[in-house]
Amino acid sequence: MSNKLTIGSNMLWESSRMMLPEHKAILKEHEQKRTHINPKTYDEQLLEEMSNTIEQLYSTKTLATFTYYEDHTRYQLEGTVDDIDKTAKQVVVKEENTRYFINFLDFISIDV
Amino acid sequence: MRTIFLIDMQSFYASVEKVKNSHLWNHPVVVAGDPKKRNGIILAACPIAKTFGIKTAEPLWQAYQKCSSLHVVSPHMSLYIDVSYQITQLLEQYSDYVEVYSIDEQFVDVTSTERLFGNKYVLADSIRREIKDSMGIEAKIGMGPNKVLAKMACDHFAKKNETGIAELDPNHLEETLWPLPIGKLFGVGSRMQTHLTQMGLHTIGNLANYPVKWLKKRWGINGEVLWQLANGIDLSPVVPSTHELQKAIGHHMTLPHDYHSIQSIYVILLELSEEVARRVRKQNKIGTIVHVSVKGANLDKKEGFHRQLKLEAPTQLAQVIYKTAKQLFMKHWSGCPVRGLGIALGGLAENVERQLSFFDQPLEQEELARTIDDLKDLYGPTSVIKASSLFSDAQAHQRAKKIGGHDR
């Protein structure tokens, strides 16, 4: 249980403030808009290009930088393509010793 | 060390009204509720009105006695929320860390951005000027290495000096903060003040130098918190997302007159349940704990109560909330006249998956409720109402026009 003395807790201020629910609702919406990235729109050509790159990286096992989108946030990995699952449309990227499963459509860019 | 600002809008409601009605600029102005509907107290008084000795929260008639040429303006709550939100956005140009503390106070953590503007004094000055230029409102800024010092710098120093900016340095609290009376410490209310003065602690400095273990023994965590605050210690971060988390969704209403009959009280309970349920659905949540609070007409006698009951299965339906609230009310109501009523739904969770009760089939009901919500969104909150809201004691139509109990 955290309390007002817990490090990193904001309870001292959260328990003392007075906010109208209408005001809170606006701020909540604002915060979501501010921090969340919208999913990208797809470009057929770009997808094809990326699919080729992934195939190539899979066969050569070269190190590349993968930028992808998940849960309204942008993530970046540096690793190799470990596996391609064509039925699930997923790519397995291996960064150091961890394997990440990324949906093909969630890739934003791949830089070799 | 961090640099935290607390930015406070001077007599916020009154200042907004003055900007809106420029002919009031040089007159004493107060914003006050309607005296006929029992909210005739001063919500905000402009600096000119304050020179007559008018204070926030005093009754309107008392203010008139102090100044007969007083201009009284009704509140426009949604406008104030709007302006406050615009100021939040303006502050976000200076730092990503802006936390709204109340409608007229916002914390900004400028630790990592202050040097982009020169230094914190230049920055504070530029924020003040920009708020004044774009909104016409005077801002006061308190600075400190943490939130509590920023807040007290603002409340006790910035509001009283010419520049509108004040800083509390943790190394010089002895000369600045400590001589102030104990009631001025953030977090000390009138009851706490009595306790502390009875212990011989009259100033903030007295408390700061009192052995913390005795404070802990008497008040537990709260005692230690107060001791830390008196010593200028506060580790709380500035959290922009602080309003995202919500433990309960609730509504409270002060009635236009005291209600005596249980029938008319039920009408209000149902309306409140409807409103709570609608907001719960809007956020796609479900809740399990129903709270009911009742304020008695006689404020001195403490006839009011607050009770809660846990449901067997989580809900987002007004009927279920109403049924439980009614049950709680019947059990605990002494028959006293009622001045205010409140209902809240707590124990909130995302409406993703849940255990359904074996006997109820709520999903169809929820579908119906969502359809009604959509109608209300499209055609206004009173487009679909319960027949009971047509009774003379019902408040749905009145409430649709209000925010925080005052006109929109």
Image (cartoon, coloured by chain):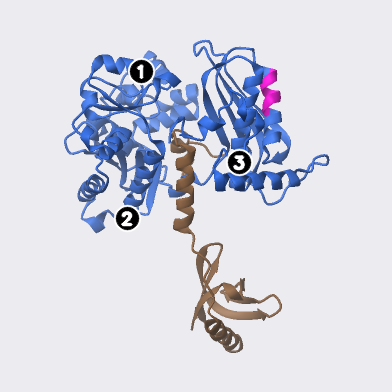
Chain colours: A brown, B blue
- Mark 2 belongs to chain: B
Q: Chain of mark 3?
A: B
Label 1 close to label 2 by CB (< 8 Å): no
Quadrant of the drawing holding the C terminus of chain B: top left
Q: Is residue B327 magenta?
A: yes
Q: Residues within 10 Å of mark 3 (few under 14, many from 20)?
A: many
Q: What's the amino acid at mark 1?
A: Pro
Check chain identity for marks 1 and 2: say if they share one.
yes
**Residue designated by label 2:** B93
Q: Residue under label 1, please give it.
A: B59
Label 1 resides on the chain identified as: B
Instruction: Check disc 1 and report its element: helix, strand or loop.
Output: loop
Give the mark nearer the N terminus: 2 vs 3: 2
Do the residues indicated by labels 2 and 3 lie within the same chain of the protein?
Answer: yes
Task: Kindly identify the amino acid type of the residue bearing the numbered disc 3.
Answer: Arg
Q: Residue at x 55, y 40 (%)?
A: B381
Query: Dividing the picture into quarters, in which one does residue B192 lie?
Result: top left
x and y percent of residue B172 in the render? Answer: 24, 35
Q: Disc 3 marks which residue? A: B278
Q: Which residues are magenta?
A: B325-331
Q: Could you tell whether B345 is left or right of B353 in the image?
A: left
Q: Amino acid at mark 2?
A: Gln
Q: Where is residue B19 drawn, in percent x and y?
A: 26, 39
Upstream in sequence: badge 1 or badge 3: 1
